[in-house]
Amino acid sequence: MTQVTREVVLAHGLWVPAMVMSPLAARLARSGLRCHNFGYRGRSAPIEAHAARLARFARAVGPAHFVGHSLGGLIVLEALGSESSVEAGRVVLLGTPVQGCLSGRRLARHALGRWVLGQSGHPFSPHYDDMIELWLNGQYHPMLFSREAVEAAARDHLVLRPE
């Protein structure tokens, strides 16, 4: 991992323009990060060509974290895997089909699956940027899976009683 940096390179998905990353860039900017939106025309060239352009873009930015959405994540991975001169900090992939996305579609059909996927990826969720500072510092919120862990961490209790 490269030095600590406040630079973030954003790469959008296939069927959308770079400006769709603007709400995320605005949230990150409010946390003190400097965002650089990388744009490409999805099907106009192979992933390798987009990755080469992203690598040139990233070298001009300097050491940076990367956030890639969907195909943008694949382009980020290709650029970082094929261009050793790109200095990368953390890499976040949002909905990137690294191994396909059939399981995600199936998981989202069920209530438990929607709970697992959560709402933090929705730009208008009040929890969208809850973990930015932790992420910058290499930290995270622990996931609580046992009843005992959840009860120990609880701040309040809600009891529902039928009439």
Image (cartoon, rainbow, N blue to C red):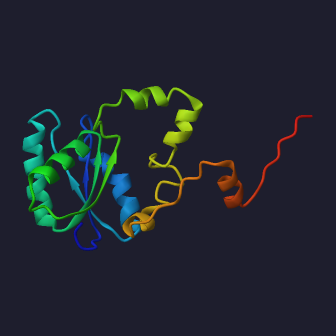
* Residue at x 42%, y 32% (from the top left corner): 104
Q: Nearer the viewer, residue 154 or 126?
A: 154
Picture residue at 51% right of the left edge, 26% below the top: 109
Seen in the image, is 64 located left or right of residue 83? right
Residue 32 point in image, percent of width and height: 37, 71
Q: Nearer the viewer, residue 66 or 14?
A: 66
The residue at the point 24 percent across, 66 percent down is: 1
Q: Residue 156: give x, y in percent of width and height.
A: 75, 58
- Indicate whether 89 appears above or below 69: below
Please, which residue is most extreme toward the right here?
163
* Quadrant assignment, res 111: top right
Percent from the top left, x then y, of residue 61? 16, 66
Horizontal and vertical percent position of residue 119:
51, 45
Which quadrant of the figure contains the C terminus? top right
Residue plotted at (46% across, 59% down): 129
In the image, is 81 to the left or to the right of 7? left
Q: Is residue 39 left or right of residue 101?
A: left
Is residue 8 visible in the rendered structure shown here? yes
